């Protein structure tokens, strides 16, 4: 209990700012979602929790000022990889297998690992050991001034947007045209009909009358026995 006392004292006596609280909530959701990726029995649910992990991580990166990496996480990992995983899992039609082993067999080992993990978390969150969280200090007597706030400051996304759409707009349009040609080419290749392959016209076959198709040996239509 003496080891956990500094952590509880830190949590109940430290005045958290709004940003720190949001960081804590997003980090907690990311940890819970990562745990549910492994714990979920349904593979589709695992992929959905996997997407939620990246959403929470993107929120953490935005609060830390790394908005460009947050957008990369959303576009690359969620927009491409995670959606691909989801479609593959749904197309495989994986049957959910029930776990018949006893869960109590793994309870002691998992409990020891969980205690070690929480002890490390409390050890890291202690401000006296590693000052991760902001501390309130009186710096007025030092006459400290942030000169970066006196000039116009842009974020990473604003800087990239200014460069991309102002100085390199020609290359941006060229790359857009290349992607457009590739997309149209893929559509044309799938719509191209070759004469060497024998196909059936589905609409024409459905429109035919069955009484006119069934013929006798002499070429006369078969009688309706009904």
Image: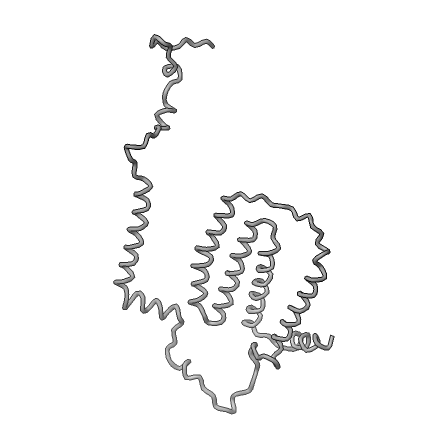
x 39%, y 10%: residue? 222
Toward the viewer: 114 or 56?
114
Left or right, residue 177 beside residue 59: left
Toward the viewer: 14 or 115?
115
Is residue 202 placed above or below 122 in the rendered structure? Answer: above
Residue 29 in the image: state x and y as whole percent: 58, 62
Left or right, residue 122 beside residue 140: right
Q: Quadrant of residue 11?
A: bottom right
Residue 22 in the image: state x and y as whole percent: 55, 68
Rendered image coloring scheme: one colour
Q: Quadrant of residue 153?
A: bottom left
x 46%, y 55%: residue? 81
Is residue 157 placed above or below 133 in the rendered structure? Answer: above
Count numbered badges in the picture: 0
Residue 32 in the image: state x and y as whole percent: 60, 61
Q: Quadrant of residue 152?
A: bottom left
Is residue 155 placed above or below 176 in the rendered structure? Answer: below
Residue 52 in the image: state x and y as whole percent: 53, 58
Toward the viewer: 3 or 61?
3
Image quadrant occupied by the N terminus:
bottom right
x 47%, y 52%: residue? 83
């Amino acid at each position: 209990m003496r080891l956990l006392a500094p952590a509880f004292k830190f949590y109940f006596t430290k005045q958290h700012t709004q940003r720190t609280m949001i960081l804590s909530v997003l980090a907690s959701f990311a940890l819970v979602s990562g745990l549910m990726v492994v714990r979920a029995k349904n593979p589709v649910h695992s992929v959905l929790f996997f997407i939620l992990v990246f959403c929470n991580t993107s929120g953490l990166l935005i609060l830390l000022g790394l908005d460009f990496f947050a957008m990369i996480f959303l576009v690359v990992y969620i927009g491409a990889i995670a959606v691909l995983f989801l479609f593959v899992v749904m197309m495989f039609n994986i049957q959910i297998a029930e776990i018949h082993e006893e869960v109590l067999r793994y309870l002691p080992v998992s409990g020891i690992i969980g205690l070690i993990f929480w002890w490390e978390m409390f050890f890291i969150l202690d401000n006296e050991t590693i000052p991760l969280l902001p501390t309130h200090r009186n710096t007025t007597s030092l006459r400290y001034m942030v000169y970066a706030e006196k000039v116009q400051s842009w974020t990473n996304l604003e800087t990239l947007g200014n460069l991309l759409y102002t100085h390199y707009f020609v290359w941006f349009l060229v790359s857009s045209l290349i992607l457009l040609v590739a997309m149209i080419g893929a559509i044309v290749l799938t719509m191209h009909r070759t004469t060497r392959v024998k196909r059936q016209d589905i609409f024409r076959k459905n429109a035919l009358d069955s009484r006119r198709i069934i013929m006798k040996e002499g070429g006369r239509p078969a009688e309706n026995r009904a």
